Image (tube, rainbow, N blue to C red):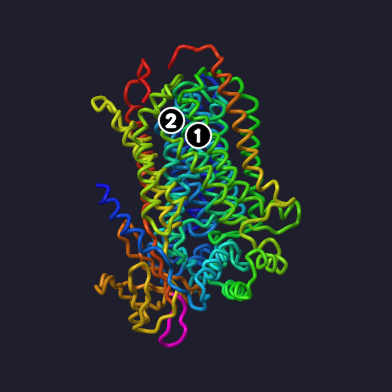
Amino acid sequence: MKSLLAALLLVVFANAARAVPVPGTLADPAQETRARALQKELRCMVCQGESIDESNAPLAADLRVLIRDHIRAGESNEQIKQFLVARYGDVILMQPPFEADTYALWLTPFLVLIFAGGIATWVVVRAARAPQGDAG
Amino acid sequence: MTGEIGLFALCLALALSLIQAMAGLSGARPQADLARAVASAGALGLFVFVALAFGALTYASVSDDFSILNVAQNSHTLKPLIYKISGVWGNHEGSMLLWVLVLGVYSAAVAVTRSGSDRLTSAALGVQGLIAAAFLVFILFTSNPFVRLDPAPFEGAGLNPLLQDPGLAMHPPMLYAGYVGLSAAFSFAAGALIAKERDWARAARPFMLAAWIALTLGIALGSWWAYYDLGWGGFWFWDPVENASLMPWLIATALLHAALATERTGAFRSWSLLLAIAGFSLSLIGTFLVRSGVLSSVHSFASDPTRGLYILVLIFSAIGGALALFAWRAPSLEEGAAFAPVSRETTLLINNVLLVTVFSIVFVGTLYPLLANALFDTKLSVGAPFFQKLFVPVFFVVLILVPFGPRLAWHRGDLRAAMRALAPAAGAALVVGVSILAIAAPRSLAGAGAFAIAAWLLTASAIELSKLNWRAVRLSAFAAPLAHAGLAVTLIGVAGVTLWRSEGLEVLKFGESMNIAGYTLRLDGVGAVQGPNYEAARASVTVLRNGQTLAVMVPERRIFPAERQETVQTAIRTTIVSDLYLALGDQRDATHWTLRAYVNPLAPFIWLGAVVMALGGLLSFVGRLGRARAVPQAVPAPAE
């Protein structure tokens, strides 16, 4: 049974290792992987909520070429992002930075969790103390 | 004539909705049988006249009556019949009419199934009437679908080609059945507050379930459409409009669970009321986001900022009114049920805390760009990386805790016994997690975790089924195990596509091949094909594996001359455990085309899981209908 599972998994995953090169890609596979990851973090400015990784727009294609030029020049991901933020503003980042403008964005879910968890704890404690009525 | 009949029917529907609202609300008083009967009749009448109006618009669209502005702007003589029908709701005016039609269906269902004889039902019908009136006023004064055009044009402008797709033809009605179904839960909650009725959760549950099932399937349809139609092989883009449908789903899921406790033990009564109010409020907000165009999105096809204001006022009145009613009346309904810290009630509470947290992530992420723009005058994007970072960890915790709920009894549970019962599931999770870590390439800890959780959920569901007393089993006993197993199935699919997909993009000359994940794809040629209302470039791609021909796939690019738009028609070859996905790129020269290929392991499981979840909901729904007809039990059944 287990060997069957293993065989199945092999069929499904083993060949999924690496993507085929894209035209105009970087020769170094590690650099290309970096470029692909970076593409997913940058927004296509003329599209509607898509990253430049998944957009057909010419601007997105230009940016895909541009970040590869910068990677070839030996820049780090941070340097490339800084360059693009200076040019287009924070709106180009798919994941907004953690700064004064976005504290509320990043912290709200945690506050909700703490607040809701607090209320729930209070409800449980109160329910445990309440006189047990007739069950049902 | 058709347009005038439709418009007249809408005016009558508005009058009936007002009668339904007044009669229903006054029927919330004791001894007001006549008012209740009038409210029920009003609901049925409303449904008939809205259906008539909808029928009129559909007829106009099918018969190419371009003297009606709406049809002239959105239809075309060459458009296939199915899209002439689905085109009715493929635009703003028509989709609002569909909204009210679905509302009418739910109101009529409330009136028929509950015969309108009790105060709760009457008050609920009254609230439904108010909602219908608000939307009918909106349609008649800002979005009249029957406006005439003189002179009538010879030809229509056509429908957005992206919408000319079977998946998207069905998506809006399904989603609306979910959105608007939550209005029934909302109306019962408001009705309970008006009529001071404690036992509202039982009455509202079939409608909550119907709404949840439709919402689950509607979201799945939308995601499936995005998968095969947008040409990127993605299934969820964390797009504002997608999020707008996910938010009510998360709250509806929380509501289904909380209301379970309310119905069985009276616990969390005011919390369930609040969730019912929140669920429909989010449906309204979702409608607002999609219809007003305040959020840019690949999905907002029919948008108009001027109408946003009316919907905004409507939202604030509905939410504000309901919350005021809640603050006033809810404390008198709460009775403070007693339960031990280790009990099913506590697990449902934890479920709700986490689901609300997950909801808050989606909510704040979707609305923050708007807020930041208004408050700080900054432009921000909140995209997939934000949601994935926060959503995934919390949702993993939710999934891990799922099996404990059904294993603990109401009032007081036995955690030790639950752990013992679930030990095999933990074992299965460990084995699966470790094997995935060892076998799957590239190695992924998140993937191993996802598979371990899936194994945990599936085994726990199997354990749940094995503990059933098969001699006296009820249909609804299968509901939770099935729905929870559906989560596992979806999780497997999501993990497969996100973590182990392969992709390739190459410029191919006719006769050249590319390789992807063991497949060889040979571009044999690209030919021109004439469709009913489009011209297509159809590629012929031979798929080979180990030198053997498996299939010929035909991805297309379609040009719609009437609408002056181009769409990508992907070709997908599925083996259930894996999808080979092809999209034809742009033409480089006479014999060179770009071809994009993906291998998406386990992709079909994403939507299969949603269907399994919906099936679980359906069993609960059907079981409930069967029980509603049976004589009410005097003695409560033991914990399921």
The outermost residue toward the front is: B438
* Residue B122: image location, x then y, percent: 50, 29
- The residue closer to the viewer here, B608 or B270, is B608
Residue at mark 2: B405
Q: At x 59% / y 56%, what residue is drawn?
A: B383
- The residue closer to the viewer here, B545 or B445, is B445
- Quick check: B142 above or below B462? below
Q: Chain of mark 1?
A: B
Quadrant in which the C terminus of chain B is drawn: top left
Residue at mark 1: B351
For the residue marked with disc 2, what is the amino acid? Gly
* Residue B612: image location, x then y, percent: 35, 44
- Magenta span of residues: B585-593
Q: At x 65% / y 36%, what residue is drawn?
A: B320
For the residue marked with disc 1, what is the amino acid? Asn
Q: Is residue A43 left or right of residue A132?
A: right
Q: Is residue B283 left or right of residue B430?
A: right
